[in-house]
Image (tube, rainbow, N blue to C red):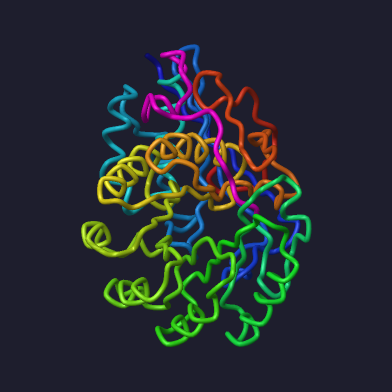
């Protein structure tokens, strides 16, 4: 089967800068849409590196994609095998290529891509809303889509100020709403201890990446002091996964573009579930193609950790997009039952790029 790979650059401006410690990391999302044609079938993938979170650089990702286009294996199976060595060094590019390849294979089989990961995958997933900074909420209508979990970024202000903001926010929080807090590695151990003591009695669903130096022994000690689940996210890239599985931490956050693909992400979630840990899937604020891909993974992971809210309702932060994102209604993201990713058209959002 003749395989052709097209690389389409895009630039999607944000409605406002992403909140939290990564606020200055990006005011727009740049990347490439991959269009892989195999015979009469086409698969899509999104390569949107975010070095601040641990992916390769844009330059490295673009060079890798161009080299792959010029020297790829003649078969889909061979292309997938070739990605094994690249997932650690080029996770965003590997994820995009794997997504396009799996999209084609799922279309060949006539099944949604998520069913290639597990036949227990669901058709809709619970999602959280992103409200912004804990002291300066960027979206006052964050629960407009009916989400029961609202995510807030912390670590931008003195801890006493953020604790005060959090308590004031909770005074007016609608009944049943819970808060997911994310510090992106903001604090030393003692500051995290202080925060955890202040959270007693508040409707906090979890706390992600509190420590500036994510030592597993320190995190275990912190987890012993609280019933609030502590979660690892971007630091999974740098820690021994076997040691993470041995830790007391009850929750992991999986970003497929950071881990190198959907298949690896699902394997990680399955291993974690086998050790009693729950997993949620979150985006890197990719285009709609990337959100569709992450949603397919989340629908598979939900069979292992049912009912948790996944961090995928980020498309509203973009001023424009390359495709229609999955529909979110009453706190749930609904996935297409069409074969593959469920994407039928990709719009033009091209910018000049040395890799086009």
Q: Is residue 346 left or right of residue 340?
A: right
Image spot of residue 145 (x, y percent):
72, 45
Rendered position, 266 above or below 4: below
Q: How many marks?
A: 0
270 displayed left or right of 152: left
- Residue 64 in the image: x percent, y percent? 40, 46
Please identify the quadrant where the N terminus is shown.
top left
Report the residue at 36% width, 71% height from top.
Answer: 223
In the depicted structure, whether residue 343 falls above or below residue 322: above
Q: Which residues are magenta?
A: 107-129
| Magenta span contains residue 329 | no
Up/down of 343 relative to 153, above or below: above
* Closer to us: 92 or 150: 150
Q: Quadrant of the C terminus?
A: top right
Residue in the image at 53% along x and 47% along y? 310
Measuring from the top left, give residue 308's x and y in whole percent. 50, 47
- Asked if the stretch drawn in magenta spans residue 118, the answer is yes
- At a point 62% along the width and 83% down the height, the residue shown is 157
Nearer to us in this view, 276 or 329: 276
Along the line of sight, which residue is nearer the eye, 294 or 247?
247
Instruction: Tell me the quarter of the picture where residue 73 sits.
Output: top left
Query: Relative to 238, is 313 on the left or the right?
Result: right
- Nearest to the observer: residue 160 or residue 138: 160
Residue 227 place in picture, x, y as percent: 42, 67
Look at 60% across and 59% down and name the residue there: 178
């Amino acid at each position: 089967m003749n395989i052709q790979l097209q690389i389409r650059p895009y630039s999607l401006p944000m409605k406002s800068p992403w909140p939290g410690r990564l606020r200055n990391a990006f005011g727009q999302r740049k990347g490439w849409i991959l269009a892989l044609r195999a015979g009469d079938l086409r698969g899509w993938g999104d390569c949107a590196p975010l070095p601040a979170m641990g992916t390769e650089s844009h330059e490295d990702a673009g060079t890798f994609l161009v080299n792959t286009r010029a020297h790829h294996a003649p078969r889909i199976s061979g292309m997938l095998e070739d990605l094994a060595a690249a997932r650690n060094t080029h996770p965003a590019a590997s994820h995009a290529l794997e997504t396009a390849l799996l999209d084609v294979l799922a279309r060949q089989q006539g099944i949604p891509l998520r069913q290639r990961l597990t036949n227990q995958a669901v058709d809709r997933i619970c999602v959280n809303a992103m409200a912004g900074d804990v002291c300066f909420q960027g979206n006052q209508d964050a629960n407009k889509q009916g989400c029961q979990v609202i995510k807030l970024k912390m670590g931008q202000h003195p801890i006493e100020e953020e604790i005060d903001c959090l308590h004031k926010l909770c005074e007016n929080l609608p009944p049943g709403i819970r808060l997911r807090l994310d510090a992106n590695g903001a604090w030393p151990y003692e500051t995290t201890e202080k925060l955890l003591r202040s959270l007693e009695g508040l409707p906090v669903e979890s706390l992600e990446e509190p420590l500036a130096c994510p030592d597993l022994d320190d995190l275990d000690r912190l987890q012993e002091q609280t019933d609030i689940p502590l979660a690892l996210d971007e630091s999974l890239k740098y820690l021994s996964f076997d040691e993470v599985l041995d830790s007391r931490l009850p929750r992991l956050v999986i970003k497929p573009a950071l881990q190198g693909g959907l298949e690896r992400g699902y394997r990680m979630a399955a291993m974690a579930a086998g050790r009693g840990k729950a997993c949620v899937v979150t985006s890197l604020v990719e285009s709609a193609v990337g959100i569709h891909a992450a949603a397919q993974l989340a629908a598979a992971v939900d069979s292992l950790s049912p009912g948790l809210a996944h961090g995928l309702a980020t498309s509203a932060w973009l001023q424009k997009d390359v495709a229609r994102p999955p529909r979110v209604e009453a706190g749930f993201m609904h996935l297409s039952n069409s074969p593959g990713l469920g994407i039928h058209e990709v719009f033009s959002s091209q910018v000049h790029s040395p890799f086009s």
